[in-house]
């Protein structure tokens, strides 16, 4: 069997060409919703299943107050020098880990307080209506997990920030409890973070969806205002004294020193307060050897340069193969791991709809044979925020075919039954 290349997560910072809108008239919210309605309700070609698989990206969380990568206020556009940490750097360098965890420490409070938005709840409702069984997301913010824990099911392609994972034993730990440990080990940083939050430093300067100046509270008049939390949950703070930051080790590896291949125990070394420290016999230049440095925790996300696990890769492919059409939301498909799923759908003959602000990798190929006059049943390309079109799409689908939709999935709610919670989130 030929060796398969590992599926690495690699950042791609180009901005793609302006899209061709399909159907041609889908430039108003009403026409866009009608086109997506035609897309979701058309019979699937080639005897494919009737359901739609959804693939989401960072743009979906913009309305929750997080930055995206390539949008108008995206991380790559606003901060040209932004460079995410790579997995090999994280493993190799104690200093790189200090820097990573310091930035993550500052970003966590904002991320942890952020909530799913109407787009996530619209996907929950499309699941309840029977149109969507699976969501594949590139986002690590856990919003899908919160908004629809069961239906539709979610494949988190790039992992999640809600946990840390040990690079030696694989145990996972709750990220919020880890935050408390970081506070304890770094009291000066914790005081700085508390002051920054009190001064409104993490409140956006502008409304994330409209771009209008955000309403100001007196406390937020600080010049610190507008510190941005990146999609990976970290914060950029140039010239911060990262080297003073301390982080805890894996509790399991600390209590039960892992045994190396040569049979020797690899004790996790900690300082007087329990912070991870470099084993004494190891020089900082060779600190990358994981066997020599056990008990290092990393976020449970696929870092850039890290491989996606075969199980997650297979789950994502199964989600595509189990559906008859693909709806791509708020992503430019710049990462190969996401683009190849859209390519897989295309190769299976699945109609594709894309809702994204700005161009999408390979979309000219995906839509090459698509007639701009068809109503949306064969494919859709819309350039609008997802929260503009998804809630009215749910309303439209509910209006035109609620009963059939329920029956199609064997009655998630039971035929004719309507969940009163269905529209709560879009009305509030
Ligand atoms: Zn461990």
Image (cartoon, grey):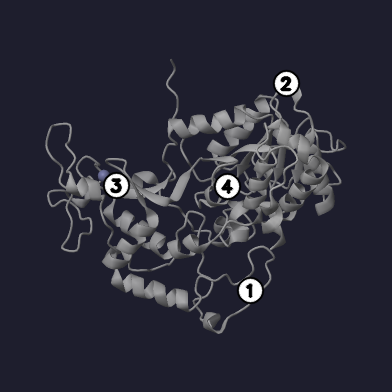
- Structural distance between the alpha carbons of marks 3 and 1: 41 Å
- Structural distance between the alpha carbons of marks 1 and 2: 49 Å
User: Residue beneath label 2, please?
Assistant: 47
For discs 4 and 3, the disc positioned in front in the rendered view:
4
- The percent position of residue 63, horizontal first and vertical second, equals 63, 60
Name the residue: 84% across, 48% down: 31
Q: Residue 218: which quarter of the image?
A: bottom right
For discs 2 and 3, the disc positioned in front in the rendered view:
2
User: Residue beneath label 1, please?
Assistant: 214
Question: On the picture, is 46 further left or further right than 142?
Answer: right
Secondary structure under the numbered disc 4 in the rendered image: loop
User: Residue beneath label 3, please?
Assistant: 92
* Disc assigned to residue 285: none
Q: Is residue 344 above or below residue 207?
A: above
Of pointers 1 and 2, the one earlier in the residue sequence = 2
- Structural distance between the alpha carbons of marks 2 and 4: 28 Å
Name the residue: 77% across, 35% down: 404
- The percent position of residue 405, horizontal first and vertical second, equals 74, 36
Secondary structure under the numbered disc 2 in the rendered image: helix
Dot 2 alpha-carbon crowd within 10 angstroms: few under 14, some 14 to 19, many 20 or more: few
* Disc assigned to residue 148: 4
Of pointers 4 and 1, the one earlier in the residue sequence = 4
Of pointers 2 and 3, the one earlier in the residue sequence = 2
- Structural distance between the alpha carbons of marks 4 and 1: 29 Å
Residue situated in front as seen by the camera: 213 or 99: 213
Secondary structure under the numbered disc 3 in the rendered image: helix
Of pointers 4 and 3, the one earlier in the residue sequence = 3
């Amino acid at each position: 069997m030929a060796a398969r290349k590992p599926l690495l997560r690699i950042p791609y910072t180009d901005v793609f060409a302006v899209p061709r809108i399909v159907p041609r008239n889908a430039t108003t919210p009403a026409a866009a919703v009608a086109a997506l309605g035609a897309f979701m309700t058309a019979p699937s070609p080639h005897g494919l299943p009737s359901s739609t698989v959804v693939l989401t990206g960072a743009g979906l969380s913009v309305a929750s107050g997080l930055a995206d990568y390539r949008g108008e206020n995206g991380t790559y556009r606003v901060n040209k020098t932004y460079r995410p940490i790579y997995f090999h750097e994280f493993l190799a360098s104690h200093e790189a880990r200090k820097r990573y965890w310091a930035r993550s420490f500052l970003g966590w409070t904002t991320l942890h307080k952020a909530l799913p938005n109407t787009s996530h709840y619209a996907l929950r409702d499309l699941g309840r209506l029977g149109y969507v069984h699976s969501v594949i997301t590139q986002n690590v913010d856990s919003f899908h997990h919160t908004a629809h824990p069961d239906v539709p099911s979610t494949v988190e392609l790039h992992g999640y920030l809600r946990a840390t994972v040990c690079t030696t034993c694989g145990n996972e730990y709750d990220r919020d409890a880890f935050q408390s440990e970081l506070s304890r080990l770094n009291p000066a940083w914790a005081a700085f973070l508390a002051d920054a939050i009190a001064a409104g430093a993490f409140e956006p300067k502008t409304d994330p969806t409209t771009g209008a100046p955000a309403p100001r509270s007196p406390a937020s008049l600080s010049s610190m205002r507008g510190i941005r939390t990146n999609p990976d949950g970290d914060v950029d703070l140039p010239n911060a004294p990262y080297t003073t930051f301390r982080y805890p080790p894996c509790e399991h590896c600390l209590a039960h020193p892992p045994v190396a291949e040569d049979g020797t125990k690899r004790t996790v070394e900690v300082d007087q307060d329990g912070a991870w420290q470099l084993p004494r016999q190891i020089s900082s230049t060779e600190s990358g050897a994981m066997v020599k440095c056990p008990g290092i925790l990393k976020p449970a996300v696929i870092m850039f340069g890290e491989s996606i696990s075969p199980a997650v890769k297979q789950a994502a492919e199964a989600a595509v193969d189990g559906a008859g059409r693909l709806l791509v939301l708020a992503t430019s498909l710049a990462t190969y791991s996401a683009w190849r799923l859209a390519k897989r759908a295309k190769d299976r003959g699945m109609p594709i709809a894309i809702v994204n602000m700005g161009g999408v990798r390979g979309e000219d190929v995906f839509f090459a044979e698509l007639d701009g006059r068809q109503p949306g049943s064969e494919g859709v390309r819309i350039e609008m925020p997802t929260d503009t079109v998804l809630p009215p799409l749910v309303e439209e689908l509910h209006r035109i075919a609620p009963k059939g939709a329920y029956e199609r999935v064997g009655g998630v709610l039971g035929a004719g039954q309507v969940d009163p919670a269905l529209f709560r989130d879009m009305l509030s």
